Image (cartoon, rainbow, N blue to C red):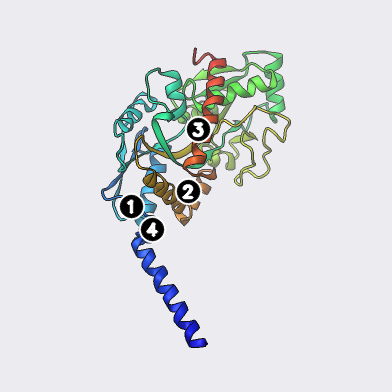
Amino acid sequence: MGAMHNQTMLRFVLTAVLCGVLAGEGVAGFAASWQPTKPLTLVVHASPGSGADLFARLVAKIVKDERLLPVAVEVLNRTGGRGAIAMNFVANKRGDPGVLMGVTTPFITAPLQQKGLPTYRDFLPVALMAEDTSAVQVLATSRYHTIHDLIEAARRQPNTVTLAFGAFGGTDHINGFQLGKAVGAQFRFVAFKGGGETVTQLLGGHIDFITSNPAETRALAQAGKVRVLAIMGEKRLAVFPDVPTLRELGINMGGTFAAFRGFVAPGGVPEEAIEAYGSLMRKVMEAAAWKRYVSDNDLVEEYLGPAQMVRFLEERERSLARALVEMGAVK
């Protein structure tokens, strides 16, 4: 009986191994019936060194280091038009499974603000991987010790409390507008060239507050130069465990407007390729390098596969379109 049992188990194991080989499990950690046969290009809409660029390059490095694909992975920067150049480039690669595009909030807002651009409906979602939670931040010497101090000042004297933002209709601009709407306060918005400049203006005492990713000011906050008043996401951040969320403080912005990070493919790519890439990104998120990246950049890790990401983009477009219209950024 024991010998027969052992023979049966041996046949079972050999069958499982053979099926694995036939299914394409030749690369560590990546088991799928479909695999790319040419190098994979990750297209980025922003310049080298930007947050979007570093995200894509990290993913490419993890895929290489963990041997998750049987082909090389390269990053291609197609900058300009707040994502328009990259979106048109990838949209024109219809049916090509060798191209993916890293996406964040401009993937939704750019087509809303620039008619004629491809929208998320022209692409096939692959995976959402993380969100950048924003936070209300002031100078450490500011007279606003709590977010309620800041809100009350803006209520008493509308258009006197200044908020710096980096791009008209960008995440920090939308967050500030939605905050003011939620609490019945009117802030004075001051535009600058980017997130780095808004931090510089804050440190110089030229504006009152910013609503940016805490990763941009973490060192300054830890050095006692910046005070974080509230987290604008659904959960507190590990880096600032004592800082409450807006919801905890009784402020409901009607949804989250955090920047997201993920990948999409051109339209027309085979379903099996989309599913395989979705599984690939899930594997990437298991790597130690990914965990460090999430921690170092104060991101909220969240995996949504292809089908779930479709629903996410639908809802995010509705909320962002509503906000942009209310702000006067979209007619």
Q: Residue 155 sits in which quadrant?
A: top right
Determine the CA span between mark 3 and mark 2: 24 Å
Tell me the distance, in whole angstroms, between the alpha carbons under discs 1 and 2: 26 Å
Which residue is labeled 3 in the image? Answer: 313
Work out whether residue 97 or residue 114 is closer to the camera in this orientation and state it. Answer: 97
Which circle's residue, 1 or 4, is located before the other in the chain? 1
Instruction: Give the foreground label among 1 and 4.
Output: 1
Numbered disc in front, either 1 or 2: 1
Q: Secondary structure at mark 3?
A: helix
Query: Dot 3 surroundings within 10 Å: few (below 14), some, or many (20 or more)?
Result: some
Mark 1, Cα crowd under 10 Å, few <14 / some 14-19 / many 20+, is many
Looking at the image, which residue is at 50% across and 52% down?
291
The residue lying toward the viewer, choosing from 218 and 50, is 50
Whether residue 316 is situated above or below residue 329 in the rendered picture? below
The three-letter code of the residue at mark 1 reads Gln
Q: Eyeballing the image, is 30 above or below 176?
A: below
Indicate which disc residue 251 carries.
none
Residue 205 shows in this picture: no
Residue 183, picture quadrant:
top right
Tell me the residue that label 4 is attached to.
Answer: 66
Give the structural element (helix, strand or loop) at label 1: loop
Q: Which residue is mark 2?
A: 293
Label 3 vs label 4: CA separation?
29 Å
Q: Position of residue 225 (x, y in %)?
A: 58, 36
Residue 291 visible: yes
Secondary structure at badge 2 equals: helix
Residue behind mark 1: 35
- Residue at the image position 65 percent from the left and 45 percent from the top: 241
**Which callout, 2 or 4, points at the residue further toward the start of the chain?**
4
Please tell me which of labels 3 and 4 falls first in the chain. 4
